[in-house]
Image: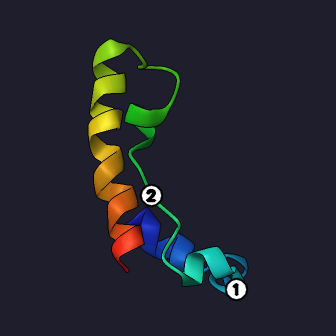
């Protein structure tokens, strides 16, 4: 998984934001500009609370 590969990078591992669990990996096809539209925006807005609220709870 790409997320695990990134987690092994010394630069990323040394960043406080990564150590605090505030780096989020998202679906690049969904979040990129190539497929954006109203339905995609809705899916992104629905995904944000799951991503962000978990980081606040920790």
Position of 50 with respect to 26 (left or right) is left
Q: Can you give x and y, in whole percent of width and height, for residue 4 in the image?
A: 44, 75
Q: In which quarter of the image is the C terminus?
A: bottom left
- Depth order, front residue of 5/42: 42
Please, is residue 12 above or below residue 46 in the view? below
| Callout 2 crowding tier (Cα within 10 Å): few <14, some 14–19, many ≥20 | few
How many badges with numbers are in the image?
2
Please, is residue 51 above or below residue 22 in the view? above
Position of 46 with respect to 1 (left or right) is left
Residue at 36% across / 46% down in the picture?
Answer: 48
Q: Mark 2 points at which residue?
A: 25
Residue at 44% across / 67% down in the picture?
Answer: 3
Please, is residue 26 above or below residue 53 in the view? above
Mark 2 or mark 1, which is nearer the start of the sequence? Answer: 1
Q: Can you give x and y, in whole percent of width and height, for residue 6 in the image?
A: 55, 71
- Depth order, front residue of 19/6: 19
Residue most extreme to the front: 57
Q: Quadrant of the N terminus?
A: bottom left
Residues at marks 1 and 2, CA–CA distance in whole angstroms: 17 Å
Q: Can you give x and y, in whole percent of width and height, for residue 45 in the image?
A: 34, 35
Q: Is mark 1 on a helix, strand or loop?
A: helix
Say if mark 1 contacts mark 2, CB within 8 Å.
no
Q: Is mark 2 on a helix, strand or loop?
A: loop
Quadrant assignment, res 38: top left
Residue at 47% across / 60% down in the picture?
Answer: 24
Position of 42 with respect to 8 (left or right) is left
- Depth order, front residue of 1/43: 43
Name the image colouring. Answer: rainbow
Q: Mark 1 points at which residue?
A: 14
Circle on res. 27: none
Position of 10 with respect to 7 (left or right) is right
């Amino acid at each position: 998984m790409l997320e695990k590969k990134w987690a092994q990078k010394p630069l990323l591992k040394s960043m406080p934001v990564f150590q605090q669990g505030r780096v989020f990996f998202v679906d690049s096809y969904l979040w990129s500009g190539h497929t954006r539209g109203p339905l995609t925006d809705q899916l992104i807005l629905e995904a944000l609370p799951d991503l962000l609220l978990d980081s606040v709870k920790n």
